[in-house]
Amino acid sequence: MSAEIEEILKRYSNYPNVSGIIIVDAFAIPIKTTMEYTLTVHYAALANNLLAKGSKMVQKLDSSNELTALRLRTLNHELMIVPEENFFIVVVQKPCE
Amino acid sequence: MNRILEDVIHKNAATVERITSENTAGYVVADNTANAVAETSFDNTGAQAIVKHLHGVLVTSCQSVIRDLDPTNKLCFLRVATRKFEYLVAPEEYFTITVVQ
């Protein structure tokens, strides 16, 4: 499992716009990160919360549908949260335009 | 308040045409203050009410996450990707637009 995580991390770090990657396990504990620790923990907790709300929303709208990704675009950056089976990934990147 | 909305909608009729002619399943425009649907292309009112729910909970919690991380930042756009559709949510000052594709 950690090999696949390493692979994901490597794949995402190859993109030029990426400023940070966090891999968080199912208990909202960050496993791997490229940012500093306190910020990472902060992102992980908030992302976990958001994902829970988001997937509940989607289930309510259509019970056969499920959340595959959440992208928040803000003024300064773009935050992408992707839930996987046992963990989830948070990527912070600079917006293209 | 509703008049502002209608004004905006009339001005953006061309944009709405373009949006609806592409790959979309529909759109919903809701006004923020009353949390009510202003305009939609969906037929069932049940779907409208549910999308209202989505706006109310998810958008506000995303905004609070962003502000929590950086008080000067703000949410510009939100994309919720699911297996069947993608919801593109654009919160503005007075209203929120959601497009489903």
Image: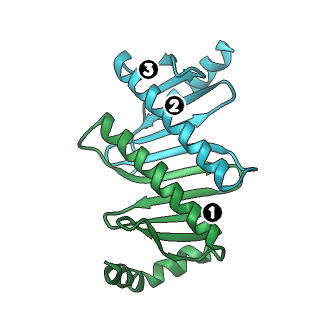
Residue A93 lies, with reference to residue B15, above or below; the image says: above
Residue A22 lies, with reference to residue B40, above or below; the image says: above
Task: State the residue at coordinates (42%, 45%).
Answer: B62
Which color has been applied to chain A in this rendered view? Answer: cyan
User: Residue A76 in the image: x percent, y percent?
Assistant: 32, 44
Question: Which is more N-terminal, label 2 or label 3?
Answer: 3
Q: Name the residue under label 2.
A: A48
Letter of the chain that mark 1 sits on in the rendering: B
Q: Number of callouts in the render?
A: 3
For the N terminus of chain B, the image quarter is bottom left
Task: State the residue at coordinates (62%, 19%).
Answer: A5
Letter of the chain that mark 2 sits on in the rendering: A
Q: Is mark 2 on a helix, strand or loop?
A: helix
User: Residue B27 in the image: x percent, y percent?
Assistant: 56, 70
Mark 1 neighbour class, 10 Å CA radius: few under 14, some 14 to 19, many 20 or more: some
Q: Quote the CA–CA distance across marks 1 and 2.
A: 25 Å
Q: Is mark 1 on a helix, strand or loop?
A: loop
- Chain that the image shows in green: B
Q: Identify the mark at residue A34; answer none if there is no mark.
A: 3
User: Residue B90 in the image: x percent, y percent?
Assistant: 43, 60
Please tell me in which quadrant of the rendered image residue B87 appears.
bottom right
Q: Name the residue under label 1.
A: B101
Query: Which is more foreground, mark 3 or mark 2?
Result: 2
Task: State the residue at coordinates (46%, 26%).
Answer: A44
